[in-house]
């Protein structure tokens, strides 16, 4: 051998088997599961507080613009308004999202749209029609009940030129509480 030539050694070989591959896979899965469990245990999972919105601050300007807005003038103790939506124009729309004191959702939607479109968007494409309910003291006395297979409920009525829908996962009594409170009086 010359000085320039070095002996080339063979790489060591190890035994390969299906049992060894399965064993390695089991160890890897155990390590991943341990990591996931560790992260879940030490993660900060505190509930996120929802910041309330001032939906009445949207109602007054809309009314000043000549739009008849149907809204709850106040909410029951412990309820939080979480969202407000106003669409101006020829076909105005108004909506408020709320959480009850039990953190269940109630929504209000008023729009110059077909009722079927509102039901499909906010309740279910296959909403089931229920009874017509008379609600004493409501802005209109008769409201149509709706429900879906997932447990959501809704009440609808025509108020002026708009369809009004009160809907959500909250119990029907909570929905009717909103229905009873609706007004179109000037917000102030």
Image (cartoon, grey):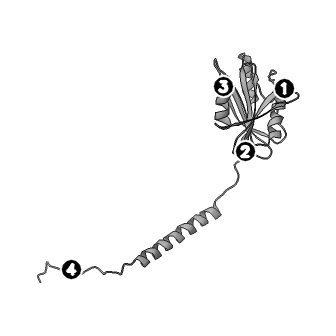
Please tell me whether residue 28 is drawn above or below residue 65 in the rendered image.
below
- Label located before the other in sequence (2 or 3): 3
Q: Is residue 11 above or below residue 122?
A: below
**Tag 2–tag 4 contact (CB < 8 Å):** no
- Mark in front: 1 vs 4: 1
Tell me the distance, in whole angstroms, between the alpha carbons under discs 2 and 3. 23 Å
Q: CA distance from mark 1 to mark 4?
A: 96 Å
In three-dimensional space, the C-alpha distance between marks 4 and 3, rounded to whole angstroms, equals 83 Å
Residue that badge 1 annotates: 141
Query: How would you rate the neighbour count of disc 1 (Cα within 10 Å): few for under 14, some for 14-19, many for 20 or more?
Result: some
Q: Which mark is residue 8?
A: 4
Measuring from the top left, give residue 95's x and y in whole percent.
Answer: 70, 30
Asked if the residue at tag 4 contacts the one at tag 1, i.e. Cβ–Cβ closer than 8 Å, the answer is: no
Give the mark nearest the N terminus, 4 or 3. Answer: 4
| Tags 3 and 1 touching, CB below 8 Å | no
> Does 42 appear above or below 76?
below
Q: Is residue 56 visible?
A: yes
Q: Which residue is mark 2?
A: 151
Name the secondary structure under disc 1. loop
Q: Residue at x 74, y 43 (%)?
A: 169
Distance of label 3 from label 1 (alpha carbons): 20 Å
Work out whether residue 8 or residue 16 is closer to the camera in this orientation and state it: 16
Q: Residues within 10 Å of mark 2 (few under 14, many from 20)?
A: few
Residue 4 sits in quarter: bottom left
Quarter of the image with the C terminus in it: top right
Residue ID for mark 3: 114
């Amino acid at each position: 051998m010359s000085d320039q030539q070095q002996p080339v050694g063979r790489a060591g070989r190890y035994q390969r088997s299906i049992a060894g591959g399965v064993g390695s896979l089991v160890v890897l899965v155990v390590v991943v599961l341990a990591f996931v469990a560790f992260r879940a245990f030490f993660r900060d999972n505190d509930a996120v507080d929802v910041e309330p919105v001032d939906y009445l601050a949207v109602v007054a300007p809309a009314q000043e613009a000549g739009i008849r807005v149907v809204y709850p003038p106040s909410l029951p103790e412990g309820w939080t308004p979480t969202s407000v939506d106003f669409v101006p124009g020829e076909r105005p729309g108004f909506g408020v999202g709320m959480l009850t004191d039990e953190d269940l959702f109630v929504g209000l939607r008023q729009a110059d749209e077909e009722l079927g479109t509102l039901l499909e968007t906010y309740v279910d494409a296959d909403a089931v029609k229920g009874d017509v309910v008379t609600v004493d003291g409501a802005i209109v006395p008769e409201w149509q009940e709706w429900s879906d297979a997932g447990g959501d409920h809704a009440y609808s009525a025509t108020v002026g030129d708009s369809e009004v829908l009160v809907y959500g996962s909250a119990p029907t009594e909570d929905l009717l509480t909103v229905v009873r409170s609706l007004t179109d009086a000037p917000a102030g």
